[in-house]
Amino acid sequence: MRTLLLLLAVIVGITLAVHPIVENKLICEACEKLVEDAEKYGGDDLEGYLKKKISEVCDFTVVLKKECEEALDDVLKELITYIEKKASPSTCCKEVKLC
């Protein structure tokens, strides 16, 4: 779990800088893991589950917490759309440009 949070913190850093197509395997894998976990544990409250995980990640960026949450909140909405469409974790992350 700690590793996932660290990997997601990396996603935050990159997402805050720009939102281009990111071809970083580490970020891609972290995103895919997040989607897999959301599918397994998110249940009917995907948004709540993902927001909780985003909050945990952004807690590591103390000074930029607000910016971190805003950046990931934009990705969150897209990600939920693809998860609800039953897209694979790989497809979800590619569509939000984290793979």
Image (cartoon, grey):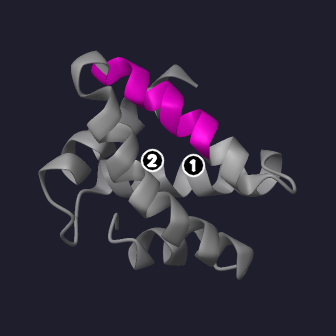
Q: Where residue 84 appears, x then y in whole percent?
A: 72, 74
Q: Which residues are the magenta region?
A: 51-61
Residue 93 lies, with reference to residue 42, above or below; the image says below
Identity of the residue drawn at 57% across and 49% down: 34
Quadrant of the rendered structure where residue 61 is?
A: top left
Q: Is residue 19 left or right of residue 72?
A: left
Residue 42 lies, with reference to residue 78, above or below; the image says above
Q: Can you see residue 56?
A: yes
Quadrant of the rendered structure where residue 67 is?
A: top left
In the image, residue 23 lies in the stretch drawn in magenta: no
Q: Where residue 25 appears, x then y in whole percent?
A: 30, 56
Q: Where residue 5 appears, x then y in whole percent?
A: 46, 29
Given residues 92 and 51, the one toward you in this image is: 51
Q: Which of the image's four quarters has the C terminus? A: bottom left
For the residues bearing labels 2 and 1, Cβ distance under 8 angstroms: yes
Q: Secondary structure at mark 2?
A: helix
Q: Can you see residue 88?
A: no
- Inspect the image, locate mark 1, and give the three-letter code of the amino acid beneath it: Leu
Q: Residues within 10 Å of mark 2 (few under 14, many from 20)?
A: many
Residue linked to disc 1 = 34
Residue linked to disc 2 = 30
- Inspect the image, locate mark 2, and give the three-letter code of the amino acid beneath it: Ala
Identity of the residue drawn at 62% across and 34% down: 52
Q: Secondary structure at mark 1?
A: helix
In the image, residue 58 lies in the stretch drawn in magenta: yes
Q: Is residue 14 left or right of residue 51?
A: left
Q: Tell which residue pokes out farthest to the left in this image.
A: 17
Q: Where residue 1 appears, x then y in whole percent?
A: 58, 25
Residue 1 lies, with reference to residue 48, above or below; the image says above
Distance, label 2 to label 1, CA atoms, is 6 Å
Q: Residues within 10 Å of mark 1 (few under 14, many from 20)?
A: many
Identity of the residue drawn at 56% across and 50% down: 33
